Image (tube, rainbow, N blue to C red):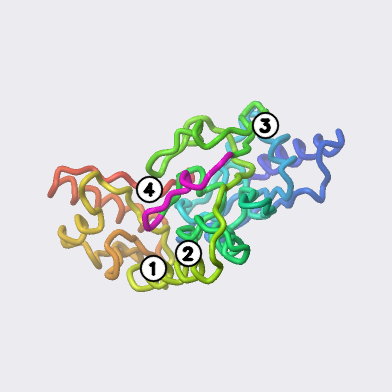
């Protein structure tokens, strides 16, 4: 464990507490936390993890981390990341304890750490339609906005009204979705370094049973086609224009190909899975081999959709 890093973080937080900006009960520190418990691949080494419980902690701490040159990585549900086996020599800001939700008419506002599958269920119970495609995606609100998560013809930007975030300078801003440069698995947050605090989604009134029927249909399709029984990060690669990525991998003879405990799913070639105690190194090597094979065979460079904590 990096005791120096822990001390620096504790000093920064203590200073904020002394000024009355935050309270000690507003956060939790886990000094030697295994990232395998915070990522859907279930791999990764130890790290210093801070769990803010209130937005005030993130708002006050972020500019201090930047000013003091403390490395940090913001983590939601960990469903689209790979944590290296040696861990992370910086502060992991896990937003999982920031889960507040609020419904106002046909709008739902949720904190960055809230589950988007949970939001889809909440919407359905309140007869609100538009969020059905979120059901079954193992991500958080912050992650969904950051990468414009989508499935089965729907994308986050389709229902997103606005996002509240804090800049690296500590300024809290709220912007409409049209100002966030949301495209295929990307948004402005990949470039500006801001941290998403919450998002508001605009939905439509609908029939409770009809909404549930759509959600159940989408889940049945997921279960049938995706290797949900194994740890993974969902689709490993971004879609290549005009081609189905999974088909490219399958036609290259890589379905079922493995490196250590990592394997290209036999059920869906677009998924790299942890099928038997894989390490992050196994997963990364397998991803590299897939990319090399497709480049050699098709002249196509597959872009990895999964982010690396490094």
Q: In 3D space, how far apart are the residues under numbered discs 4 and 3 (Cα atoms)?
A: 28 Å
Decide which of 128, 167 is in the foreground and name it: 128
The first of marks 4 and 3 along the sequence is 3
Q: Which residue is mark 1?
A: 222
Q: Nearer the viewer, residue 37 or 32?
A: 37
Query: Is residue 75 shown to the viewer in this render?
Result: no
Q: Are marks 1 and 2 in contact (CB under 8 Å)?
A: yes
Gap between marks 2 and 3 measured at Cα: 31 Å
Res 129 visible? yes
User: Mark number for residue 140?
Assistant: none
Pick out the residue farthest to the left.
Answer: 297
Which picture quadrant has residue 91?
A: top right
Query: In the image, which disc is placed on residue 136?
Result: 2
Disc 3 is placed on an element classified as strand
Gap in angstroms between the C-alphas marked 1 and 4: 19 Å
The numbered dot on residue 172 is: 3
C-alpha separation, residue under disc 2 versus residue under disc 4: 18 Å
Q: Position of residue 73 (x, y in %)?
A: 56, 42
Q: Residue 255: give x, y in percent of width and height.
A: 23, 65
> Which residue is depicted at the point 70% across and 36% down?
59
The residue located at (63%, 33%) in the rendering is 174
At 37% from the left and 48% from the top, the residue drawn is 305
Q: Which mark is residue 305?
A: 4
Q: Circle 4: is it few (<14), some (14-19), or many (20+) Cα within 10 Å?
A: some
For the residues bearing labels 1 and 4, Cβ distance under 8 angstroms? no
Q: Nearer the viewer, residue 229 or 202?
A: 202
Of the two numbered discs 1 and 4 in the rendering, the one whose residue sits closer to the viewer: 1
**Chain part drawn in magenta:** 151-162
Q: Are marks 1 and 3 in contact (CB under 8 Å)?
A: no
């Amino acid at each position: 464990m990096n005791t120096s890093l822990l001390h620096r973080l504790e000093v920064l937080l203590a200073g904020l507490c002394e000024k009355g900006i935050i309270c000690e009960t507003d956060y939790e520190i886990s000094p030697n936390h295994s990232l395998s418990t915070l990522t859907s691949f279930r791999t990764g080494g130890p790290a210093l993890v801070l769990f803010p419980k209130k937005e005030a902690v993130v708002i006050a701490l972020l500019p201090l981390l930047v000013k003091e040159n403390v490395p940090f990585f913001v983590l939601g549900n960990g469903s689209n990341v790979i944590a290296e086996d040696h861990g992370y020599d910086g502060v992991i800001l896990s937003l999982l304890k920031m889960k507040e939700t609020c419904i106002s008419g046909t709008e739902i506002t949720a904190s960055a750490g809230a589950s988007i599958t949970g939001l889809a269920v909440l919407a359905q119970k309140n007869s609100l339609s538009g969020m059905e495609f979120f059901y079954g995606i193992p991500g958080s609100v912050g992650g969904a906005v950051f990468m414009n998560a989508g499935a089965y013809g729907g994308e986050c930007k389709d229902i997103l009204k606005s996002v509240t975030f804090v800049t690296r300078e500590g300024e809290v801003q709220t912007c409409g979705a049209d100002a966030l440069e949301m495209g295929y698995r990307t948004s402005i947050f990949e470039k500006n370094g801001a941290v998403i605090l919450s998002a508001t989604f605009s939905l439509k009134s609908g029939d409770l049973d009809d909404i549930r029927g759509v959600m159940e249909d989408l889940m049945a399709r997921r279960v049938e086609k995706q290797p949900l029984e194994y740890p993974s990060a969902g689709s490993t690669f971004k879609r290549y224009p005009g081609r189905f990525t999974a088909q490219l991998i399958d036609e290259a003879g890589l379905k079922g190909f493995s490196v250590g405990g990592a394997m290209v799913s036999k059920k869906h070639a677009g998924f790299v899975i942890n099928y038997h105690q894989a390490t992050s190194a196994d997963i990364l090597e397998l991803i590299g081999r897939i990319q090399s094979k497709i480049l050699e065979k098709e002249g196509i460079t597959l872009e990895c959709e999964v982010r690396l904590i490094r």
